[in-house]
Image (cartoon, grey):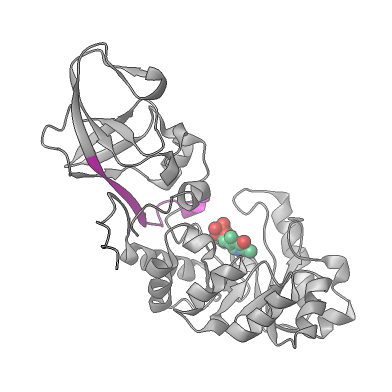
Amino acid sequence: MPPEPPPAALRLTIDRDALATNWRALDGLSGTAAAGAAVKADAYGLGVAATVPTLWQAGCRDFFVAHWCEAAPVAARVPPASVAVLHGPLTPRDAHYARDLGVRPVINSLSQAQRWIEAGGGLCDLMVDTGINRLGLPMAALGDPLIAHLQIDVLLSHLASADEDSPLNAVQLARWQEARRHIAHRRASLANSAGIALGPDYHGDLTRPGIALYGGVPCAALEGKLAQVAMPEAALIQVRGLAPGDSVGYNATFTASRAMRVGVVSLGYADGYLRCWSGKGAMRGHGHDLPVLGRVSMDMTVIDLSTAPDLGEGDWVEVVYDLPRSAQLTGLSQYELLTGLGRRFAR
Ligand SMILES: *Cc1c(COP(=O)(O)O)cnc(C)c1O
């Protein structure tokens, strides 16, 4: 047995109460519809283990992943029948896997419908493309006899511009309603997080929030209604003094104009703290704001400890990671800020 490695000097703390509160808020805002949860990409980078059981306990009964490899970790924590796989069966093996695991494939095309039926079929979801022109059955194929052979639980569509006041929203709503009239199904679903804020017409029977569960604020109507869930923290691995004129990091983009105390934090772009944070980000420790100095490197970031004489090697600092503000500051989307958080974080 190799020795157990010491704990990482990098951790992502998940506030499970905030996650449950966010789900309940979104379920409430979904009116008569139930809120499900998009948990693809390992629950937007937060980790299925830390999120899915909490969502289930809060009352969530529908979970959406994208890839087939993402289904089993979710299905190990909730009943497999409550898991749907958005990419659908691309191969016969995918279709057989869905049946063996007991999860629902989302059928996105006539060829996927054929493949599912040939594998033996069973309860599935159907994604109809109403205008995003990404994945989904074209409206023109709604009347195909193959579709009539499917046993459909959730009839889904996905909005392209739910986070904007766009005429496309009403166009997609009308097409989704048309699909609901033409195709037998148990439940209908259209809204992602921002779609929930578009009002009751968009709710159907089931909503599918993702980013808002994890503290993202995709539109103004949801401002102030969601709490931060993911808190990255990193340890100070070295503290040093700078003399006036000393520079920091690659390409010496920061130069000290006075003597200062700085700290090296074990967080870098390999962890998803990308170079766009250079000279812009901040951390917090013992109540002090600690600005990022110079370039972020692969495994390290340097911060100003001038105002925090009480912080030293081995102490932990919190990375300021409020999603809407961080997105504004860096130009990254709130989705990228979460899903980019790397594998070195202890979750
Ligand atoms: C990712 C995804 C969602 C969740 O979207 P958010 O904007 O994160 O709320 C909902 N539905 C589908 C089909 C998705 O791919």
196 is higher (above) or lower (below) than 343: below
Q: Is residue 333 above or below residue 46?
A: above
In the image, what residue occupies the spot 69% across and 82% down? 96
Question: Can residue 138 be seen in this snapshot?
Answer: yes
Q: How many marks?
A: 0
Residue 132 image point, x, y percent: 73, 55
Drawn side of residue 192 relative to residue 347, left or right = right
Q: Quadrant of ligand 1?
A: bottom right
Q: Nearer the viewer, residue 243 or 51?
A: 243
Q: Position of residue 164 (x, y in %)?
A: 62, 48
Snapshot quadrant of residue 289: top left
Quadrant assignment, res 7: bottom left
The magenta span reads 217-236
Q: Which quadrant is the N terminus positioned in?
A: bottom left
**Is residue 197 shown to the viewer in this render?**
no
| Image quarter of the C terminus | bottom left
